[in-house]
Image (cartoon, rainbow, N blue to C red):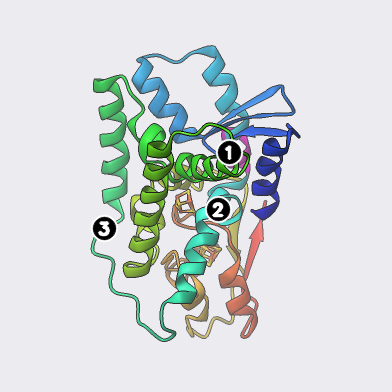
Amino acid sequence: MLAIVALFMLQYFEIRLLVGSLSGSTLLGQLKLLDVFAFLEVSAAARGISLALLTAVLPVALLYLLLGRAFCGWVCPMDLLFSLVDKVRSPGTKPPRLPLKPQVGYWLAGGLLLTALLTSLPVFTNFFSHLTNLFRAIAGVVFMASDLPVEPAVIAWSLLALLALLLLQYFYPRLWCRVLCPVGKTYGLFNRASLLKLRFRQGDCEGCELCEQRCYMGVKLVRHLDQGKLRDPNCIYCGRCIEGCRHQANLIKMSFK
Ligand code: SF4
Ligand code: SF4
């Protein structure tokens, strides 16, 4: 995660390996890359799919067909920022029950695509996306530090949007990632078919649920144990459940097979 953010940071020092943001970027000046939800939203706004968009989203889609929702566990910087917010909360505070069902996120994503279709504007990607706002805020700060012209209103908006997400994380841990985030919801659909998956060794589960206690995405691992593998759209392949189980029986592993 930090390595990828660092690669993006290099663009502000005239080293253009990866230019843009996690919503859309260019690798090595040649390969265009586009986030899958951004692709859907921009296509809805344009009321059509262009070849340029398609060639930009394909490498990303292929990567996550391989890795499932690993984007959330290994690439998205919000995961790291949310973990920092968790450290501010008093230890031992029991997280409240999530006030929304996971299906709400799919309705939200669908509503955003419909809005893009009706307004011809990718509203989420342009204004509300944490990926867009984070990179916009970083660029704004770097530009200000370098005495380059900036749009203060744009930076203020991005910072406010990010602050709102951090506050949401403080009061409702992982509500954004587990339920609302359209980017994560979209990558979650890839889990159904991805090569990477969690596999369970049949055998000695004692039902201690240490694995589930380590999973901040709320995946109910134990109920999948007898199926041999997990295809949950909320799994971000972070591996914390594996660490949790290691104390006991080492029943869970990440596998491409
Ligand atoms: S759900 Fe959204 S905010 Fe959370 S890690 Fe995934 S992309 Fe980032
Ligand atoms: S703790 Fe395990 S089940 Fe939960 S998101 Fe991470 S890898 Fe997936």
Q: Residue at x 38, y 28 (%)?
A: 41
Tell me which corner region of the image, top left, top right, bottom left or bottom right, holds residue 173: bottom left
Residue furthest toward the front?
Answer: 147
Q: Nearer the viewer, residue 245 or 51?
A: 51
Q: Judging from the image, what secondary structure is the residue with disc 2 in? A: helix
Q: Judging from the image, what secondary structure is the residue with disc 1 in? A: helix
Q: Nearer the viewer, residue 147 or 109?
A: 147
- Judged left or right of residue 217, residue 104 is left
Q: Amino acid at mark 3?
A: Lys
Q: Please, is residue 229 above or below residue 30 in the view?
A: below
Whole-number angstrom distance, CA of label 3 to CA of label 2: 24 Å
Q: Nearer the viewer, mark 2 or mark 1?
A: 1
Q: Amino acid at mark 1?
A: Phe
Residue 62, magenta (yes or no): yes
Residue to which mark 1 is pinned: 143
Q: What secondary structure is the stretch in magenta mostly built from?
A: helix
Q: Is mark 2 within 8 Å of ligand 1?
A: yes
Q: Residue at x 25, y 35 (%)?
A: 111
Q: Which residues are magenta?
A: 61-66
Q: Judging from the image, what secondary structure is the residue with disc 3 in? A: loop
In terms of sequence position, does the residue under pointer 3 or pointer 2 come before the other? 2
Residue 5, magenta (yes or no): no
Q: Nearer the viewer, residue 175 or 249?
A: 175
Crowding at dot 2, Cα within 10 Å, few <14 / some 14-19 / many 20+, comes out as: some
- Judged left or right of residue 201, residue 117 is left
